[in-house]
Image (cartoon, rainbow, N blue to C red):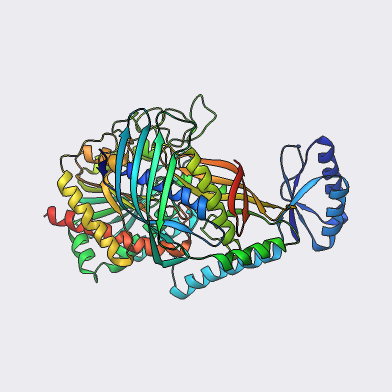
Amino acid sequence: HQVLRVKTKNEEEVKQLQLLESLEHLELDFWINPSAPALPVDVRIPAGSVQSVKAFLESQGIEYSILIEDLQDVLDKERQDMAESAQRQRSTGSFDFSAYHTLDDINAELDHLASEYSFVEKIQIGESYEKRPLYVLKFSTGGSNRPAIWLDAGIHSREWVTQASALWIANKIASDYGTDESITSLLDKMDLFLLPVANPDGFVYTHTSNRMWRKTRSKIPGSICVGVDPNRNWDAGFGGPGASSNPCSDSYHGPSANSEVEVKSVVDFIKNHGNFKAFLTLHSYSQLLMYPYGYKCTRPDDYAELESLGRAAASSIRSLYGTTFQVGTICKTIYQASGGSIDWSYDNGIKYSFAFELRDTGRYGFLLPANQIVPAAKETWLGLKKIMEHVRNKSS
Amino acid sequence: RAMELPPGHFPAARAAAVAVEYLRYLRGGPGSGLRLRELQRARRQDIDDVGHKYYLELELEDVLDKDRTVSCTAEVLYHLGSKTSAPDVQLTVQGELRSTEAADKEFYNRIRSLEKELVAENIPDSHGNVPPELEPIHLLAWVASGYVIWQNSTENTKFHLAQVKHVKQVKRNDEDLQFDFVLLLHEMVSQEVLPWEVTLLWHPQRGARVTQS
């Protein structure tokens, strides 16, 4: 079977295609139906009809190209990929951390972790714009409102390695508690809250419609454009340099600080808890390890400690595979950007505020191959652990 | 009068990216994956009435041959106030880049002997996969994007090729291969992902040139 893309130039040609559509003996399967001249028409053609359909199109002067040369090959490959993934899942008896997953699959794995480990609980801190639950995994071995660490991923939905790494990290922490000295002593003193998909609406959109979507999916009054950059929407220098006031921009800050429910839910949760000591957030790509500020280019009061801790964390990251992360303030390292999450957390008394930009440096960018998920997660975990150990030491 | 710049800060990083993109356009091909391994040193000179000039020392590698690196010195001049003129880039590569003659020839012959013109989409796909037979096309897309990025860069931009949305080979009567690309470029400062149409001609001996973008 071949799949052709037909480009019609006028109404006449559209009519010809509609005629073709009506010839049932050809058994054509239109993936995109002929409707208007400007829109391409994709059609799957059984092997037996390919020659005659092409001859017809050519005789009418209708332009087409081959979208998929041999559909069977593509289907076979996809089936093979999925079988291999299911095989990996069966053989390890668990979630395949070295593959990218849908939101539903991720949520199922959160349920699985919560049910398997007594000290892991899935809580809902709010709902997205499109009413999807915002699920956080709470890791707590006891106590009452212990000093806590916040970790989130996927606030920018196209940064797929971050949600995927968060899942691996969640599993790592859960399964190593009790055996790994560092994790055990950390969770014996502190609680950890992990939000693996901070922007679920955007994430679903990257699966269904546009892999490069970054923002939320909120409707903006007075604009045909959708979505706000959730990392320009925090109440830290809101509306300042490095954020756009244009709703169609990928760095649109939104109508007001905390206008995005995805941001407000986290702000409220952290304020109500009242005892967070660290705020860590995962992004991709560029391999950077940054601390405040983004909204201004002056150094934070804790510059020396944060720079030193950042370097130690980057060193840990590098120790595994040689991956180098640049360390510095947001403003000097990447750009001035207002309304960012770690600036808000820092200015609200959470000293250990860091933002990671994970692999790579541009070769694949947002489209990091799945076989790099686990290496990225492993090295990132070493950096996070370094920071968490320091926070734990300072919290006693 | 040139000021030393921290290599880990964005002004130097942006200039280094421009130098590498320019080099990719000049020297890239279907068998070559030039990349910046490390920016070792950067200085900047502000030249009155002319613009800002960056002096860079770079270490480069080929993604297809990571054991080898090559040093490069580059000068990148961003013209004052100019939104319409590309930065001037001068480069000196010390040492030999990996020879791609055999791979280039094999690719050239393979494409020339195709019955139907090659068409492909979404390279890499959503999961980062690139089918092996399309990797040379991916690398040629880097050459094409190298040109576009060099031409459109300022001190306030940092571009990367995000994805090849669409590529169509166009058969020609002369000896060049022609590829019409629709590229998605990611601009880091604005965070926009922008589509760009580029036509690239390539020949194993003559190299690449962009005829339309």
Q: Residue at the spot x=46%, y=28% of the render?
A: A246
Q: Is residue A370 above or below residue A291?
A: below
In-image side of A326 versus B196 (left or right): left
In-image side of A322 versus B180 (left or right): left
User: Closest to the observer: A340 or A362?
Assistant: A362
Residue B153, by quadrant, is top left
Quadrant of the rendering where the N terminus of chain B is positioned: top left
Residue A345, by quadrant, is top left
- What residue occupies the far left of the structure in this picture? A396
- What residue occupies the far top of the structure in this picture? A222
Q: Residue at the spot x=70%, y=56% of the render?
A: B175
Q: Position of residue B130 (x, y in %)?
A: 55, 61
Q: Is residue A231 above or below residue A115?
A: above
Q: Position of residue A334 (x, y in %)?
A: 33, 43
Quadrant of the rendering where the C terminus of chain B is positioned: top right
Q: Is residue A99 visible?
A: no
Q: Is residue B202 above or below residue B211?
A: below
Q: Position of residue A203 (x, y in %)?
A: 48, 48
Residue B94, by quadrant, is bottom left
In-image side of A5 versus A328 (left or right): right
* Numbered disc total: 0
